[in-house]
Image (cartoon, rainbow, N blue to C red):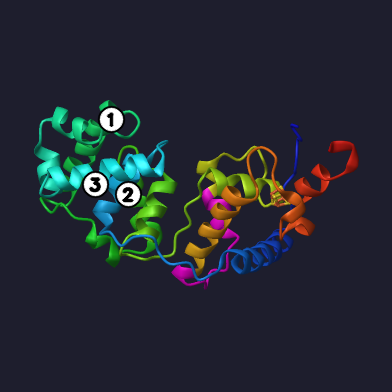
Amino acid sequence: MNLKFPIAESDAAVVRQKVLQVHDRLCIAYGCPIAYFRDLDPLSELVSALLSHRTRNADSGQSFQQLTERFVDWATVRDAPVEAVERAIVACTWPEQKAPRIQQVLRLITDRREGDLSLDFLADLSVPAARAWLEALPGVGPKTSAAVMSFSQLRRSALPVDSHHHRVAVRLGLIPAKVAVGPSHALLEAQLPQDWAAQQVYDNHEVMMLHGQRCCFYQNPACNRCPVLDLCPFGQVLLEPKNR
Ligand code: SF4
């Protein structure tokens, strides 16, 4: 069934209230605080994120592991023949595109940091400044910059939005369906309390993603066991007898 739904609620205060209700209930359902799933330095997290684009986690994880086993450090990856990097990441999608892109990004960071191939300096910048610096690199958009800031050892407040998170937000009416994943980052992050700690922002990303994976499926969402059904116009329409 292809329901054209919903229109995002226009009252920002109402939406922010709903965001908190959804967050609290999903946190109960999925168990917040949620442990960070890894502890990479920010440059390693950036490479991992570049590998993960449109790739299954297991495959991008295998590619990342191969890279770190075959090359002693990121400078060696940067300076290696591109074919060697491509062979190491063959498990992920489009290794022939990702290998030169990763090397290009590593060279640019080296140049822009005057020889220092590291992103540890981002810890000294504000989150918006750090994300802007990252997004000036080729192939780095808001999801990748947020992942580097949030998932890496930086542990800063930034909200990555994946396709599950985006789908749940649209169905709940937090954002209009016409807003794509990229532009949704700014809208969804602005709906969160400004004083939230990084862990709370991370939890919000995790519970929205988990809800999309475990309940709010792309096809046949399990609305009748959803803890936020009463807040969800999409689910309520879907459960109307004429739509079943
Ligand atoms: S009620 Fe259905 S559509 Fe709405 S969030 Fe829950 S599972 Fe998704």
Picture layout, residue 57 above or below residue 24: above
Can you give x and y, in whole percent of width and height, for residue 57 in the image? 39, 44
Query: Camera-side residue: 115 or 201?
Result: 201
Residue type beneath disc 3? Gln
The secondary structure type at the circle numbered 1 is helix
> Viewed as shown, does residue 90 lie left or right of 69?
right
Task: Check contact, mark 3 vs mark 2: CB within 8 A.
Answer: no
Tally of marks: 3
Residue type beneath disc 2? Leu
Task: State the residue at coordinates (70%, 59%).
Answer: 15
- Quadrant that contains the C terminus: top right
Q: Residue 134, which numbered label?
A: 2
Of labels 1 and 3, earlier in sequence is 3
Marks 1/3: CA distance?
A: 14 Å
Query: Camera-side residue: 20 or 210?
Result: 210
Q: In which quarter of the image is residue 79?
A: top left
The secondary structure type at the circle numbered 3 is helix
- Check mark 2 vs ligand 1: CB closer than 8 Å? yes or no: no
Quick one: which residue is furthest to the right in this view?
Answer: 242
* Residue identified by numbered label 1: 95
* Residue identified by numbered label 3: 65
